[in-house]
Image (tube, rainbow, N blue to C red):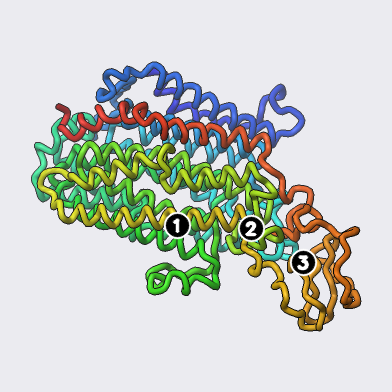
């Protein structure tokens, strides 16, 4: 068990170094780039196998105890040790990290994002995996900080170098070749998002380091197990408040907690698909894990003092994220009419980007995690840990699906994806039913449908708010509970709107030409979709289904005769569809492919299993949570 955990942490680092070295002659194959991508799949797959073996060998009757521990002196002068171990809290996060990284490597093998060398991409992906795995496995405050910071540089380069360049042709378009309506960020936008990500997290980490040093120096050790067992006995109340405030600010940036979340939408919008999956599925969990592992057991008095403020910020984040998503989900022309006064509370809407919408939804979902932690009860903390895992699985699936939509349609702009009921938009139910079904599944799982993983974490977090820890104001937490419940309604509203618009398309009269309204040139009205066969205002010309989008329209004489059925393309056929962003016509409405099915199926299965059998996860986390909150007793 010791060797397994050590190998899980070290193997990705060794794999990253090997990825940068020339491949041995027997392993190069015909394509060196594919060889290094295979290397990434192999290393991450081996790490996943070792993680599953570690989970099989874990003693579930002693889930509250640290297992597979390694404790070696590293820097004796500072009493810093290489101390590794797992318990019921860290094991699920460790396995989920290994799973998501493997699925991202597998997806990238078939759909490598353009923008840089595959060798560098695989090396950065493995370094990112090593940092996240180490964060959940180390038991020394200084090592925790180092592992926490280790993930920033790889994610920065993934966003800045490979972000926003995925397209249907598999190559980066030039300025002249960029498809009309494409939402691929320009280089400066990607770099701006990457800089914003790293500056926010680095500034938060500096503040967090001060809090960690304060606890370690005042407590006499940096050993996380010993400090948790002391339960803040050697720290004064003021020291605990200052330490929790400093550590909480640093972790809240990564969580992300409102109002420290503003880096997240830009980072998600600019990141490549696998970057968004790992950012939402793994990196956000590092912040909430740190609150449970460090703040609650090591400075309980400080956590108790600041818990109501954390709960208040969490609830504001739930409502803010939900309203922002609702503003993005509604058609642009209807935003002010349907939201009414609430529109003034939502952020400016430069573009209804589906990736940005899911990013804002993460702010709301992580608000439930923070609310559960702020209750300081076993019920609330268990709900927070469950919601962590559920969010990683469901949001990871959603970002995979959005990446597939961008690949097929050249854009993630929601208004363009909605398009017409059977033309110019996605309309996935009719054109790619499996993809549409998976998107609908991910949406209903994210809104917390009973029987799926998203339900239990949010429900338990609100249960914890109903009966908070002793000394916390119950009326205040009941108010937080009511507001969080409102957030669940808003979440259901915007996700169902997204499913309707993307999977079913806009209703007739939106993107479809209005029936009964004469054209400006006097052409009689038809029910032909506006994108195909609709006369232009200036010349009465018609764009046929076979006419390339960038070709000049062919002039035709207006006629009063009804359009003939003979030879007319079906508006729902690939030939008749004017797809968004001018993707390749033979790939425009491809349904779920083999490699996509392989990458997404585990997330779907685990989402269902966690929803139907929550005791499997709660039985693992509850003893460890009881142990932490009880000061080791």
Instruction: Find residue 511 and report its image quarter.
Output: bottom right
User: Helix or strand or loop: what does disc 3 sit on?
Assistant: loop
* Residue at figure coordinates x 39%, y 34% from the top left: 93
Q: Pointer 1: what residue?
A: 493
Left or right: residue 200 compared with residue 110: left
Front residue of this view, candidates 314 and 482: 482
Going from N to C along the chain, the mark reached first, 2 or 1, is 2
- Residue 522: give x, y in percent of width and height: 81, 83
Image quadrant holding the C terminus, namely top left
Residue 259 numbered tag:
none
* Residue at figure coordinates x 47%, y 34% from the top left: 608
- Residue 523: give x, y in percent of width and height: 82, 79
Left or right: residue 34 compared with residue 342: right
Q: Pointer 3: what residue?
A: 528
- Residue 77: give x, y in percent of width and height: 23, 32
Mark toward the viewer: 2 or 3: 3
In three-dimensional space, the C-alpha distance between marks 2 and 3, rounded to whole angstroms, equals 24 Å
Left or right: residue 230 compared with residue 147: left
- Neighbours of disc 3 within 10 Å: few (<14), some (14-19), many (20+): some
- Neighbours of disc 2 within 10 Å: few (<14), some (14-19), many (20+): many
User: Helix or strand or loop: what does disc 2 sit on?
Assistant: loop
Is residue 239 at least partly visible in the picture? yes
* Residue at figure coordinates x 58%, y 37% from the top left: 122
Going from N to C along the chain, the mark reached first, 2 or 3, is 2
Going from N to C along the chain, the mark reached first, 1 or 3, is 1
Say if mark 1 contacts mark 3, CB within 8 Å.
no
Q: Pointer 2: what residue?
A: 411
């Amino acid at each position: 068990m010791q060797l397994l955990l050590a190998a899980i942490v070290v193997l990705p680092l060794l794999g990253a170094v090997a990825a940068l070295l020339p491949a041995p002659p027997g392993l190069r194959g015909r394509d060196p780039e594919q060889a290094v991508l295979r290397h990434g799949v192999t290393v991450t797959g081996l790490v996943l196998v070792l993680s599953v073996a570690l989970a099989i060998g874990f003693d579930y009757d002693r889930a509250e105890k640290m297992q597979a521990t390694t404790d070696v002196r590293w820097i004796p002068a500072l009493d810093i040790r290489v101390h590794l171990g797992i318990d019921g809290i860290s094991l699920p996060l460790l396995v989920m990290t290994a799973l998501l990284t493997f699925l991202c490597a597998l997806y990238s093998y078939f759909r490598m994002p353009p923008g840089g060398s595959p060798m560098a991409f695989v090396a950065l992906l493995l370094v990112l995996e090593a940092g996240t795995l180490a964060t959940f496995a180390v038991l020394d405050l200084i090592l925790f900080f180092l592992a926490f910071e280790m993930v920033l540089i790889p994610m920065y380069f993934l966003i800045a170098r490979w972000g926003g360049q995925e397209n249907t042709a598999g190559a980066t378009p030039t300025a002249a070749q960029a498809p009309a309506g494409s939402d691929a960020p320009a280089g400066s936008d990607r770099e701006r998002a990457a800089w914003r990500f790293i500056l926010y997290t680095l500034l938060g980490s500096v503040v967090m380091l001060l809090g960690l040093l304060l606890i370690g120096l005042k407590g006499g050790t940096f050993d996380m197990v010993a400090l948790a067992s002391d339960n803040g006995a050697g720290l004064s109340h003021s020291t605990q408040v200052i330490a929790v405030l400093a550590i909480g600010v640093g972790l809240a940036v990564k969580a992300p907690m409102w109002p420290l979340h503003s880096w997240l939408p830009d980072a998600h919008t600019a990141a490549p698909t696998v970057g968004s999956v790992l950012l939402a599925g793994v990196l956000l969990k590092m912040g909430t894990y740190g609150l449970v592992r460090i703040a609650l057991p090591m400075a309980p008095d400080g956590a108790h003092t600041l818990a109501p403020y954390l709960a208040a910020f969490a609830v504001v984040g739930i409502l803010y994220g939900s309203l922002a998503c609702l503003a993005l989900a509604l058609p642009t022309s209807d935003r002010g009419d349907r939201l009414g006064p609430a529109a003034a509370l939502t952020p400016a809407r430069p573009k209804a980007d589906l990736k940005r919408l899911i990013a804002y939804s993460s702010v709301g979902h992580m608000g439930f995690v923070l609310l559960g932690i702020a209750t300081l009860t076993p019920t609330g903390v268990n709900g927070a840990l469950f919601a962590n895992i559920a969010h990683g699985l469901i949001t990871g699936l959603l970002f995979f699906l959005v990446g597939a939509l961008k690949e097929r349609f050249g854009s993630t702009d929601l208004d363009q994806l909605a398009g017409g009921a059977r033309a110019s938009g996605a309309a996935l139910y009719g054109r790619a039913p499996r993809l549409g079904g998976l998107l609908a599944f991910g949406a209903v799982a994210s809104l917390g449908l009973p029987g799926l993983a998203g339900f239990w974490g949010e429900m338990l977090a609100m249960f914890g708010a109903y009966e908070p820890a002793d000394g916390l104001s119950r009326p205040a937490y009941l108010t937080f509970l009511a507001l969080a419940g409102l957030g669940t309604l808003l979440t259901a509203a915007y996700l169902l709107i997204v499913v309707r618009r993307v999977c079913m398309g806009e209703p007739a009269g939106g993107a479809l030409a209005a029936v009964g309204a004469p054209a400006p040139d006097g052409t009689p009205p038809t029910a032909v979709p506006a994108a195909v066969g609709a006369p232009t205002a200036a010349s009465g010309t018609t764009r046929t289904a076979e006419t390339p989008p960038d070709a000049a329209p062919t002039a035709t004489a207006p006629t009063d005769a009804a359009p003939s059925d003979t030879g007319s393309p079906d508006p729902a056929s690939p030939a008749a569809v004017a797809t968004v962003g001018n993707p390749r016509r033979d790939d425009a409405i491809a349904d779920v492919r083999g490699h996509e099915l392989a990458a997404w199926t585990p997330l779907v299965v685990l989402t269902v299993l966690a929803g139907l059998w929550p005791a499997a996860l709660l039985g693992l986390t509850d003893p460890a949570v009881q142990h932490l909150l009880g000061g080791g007793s």
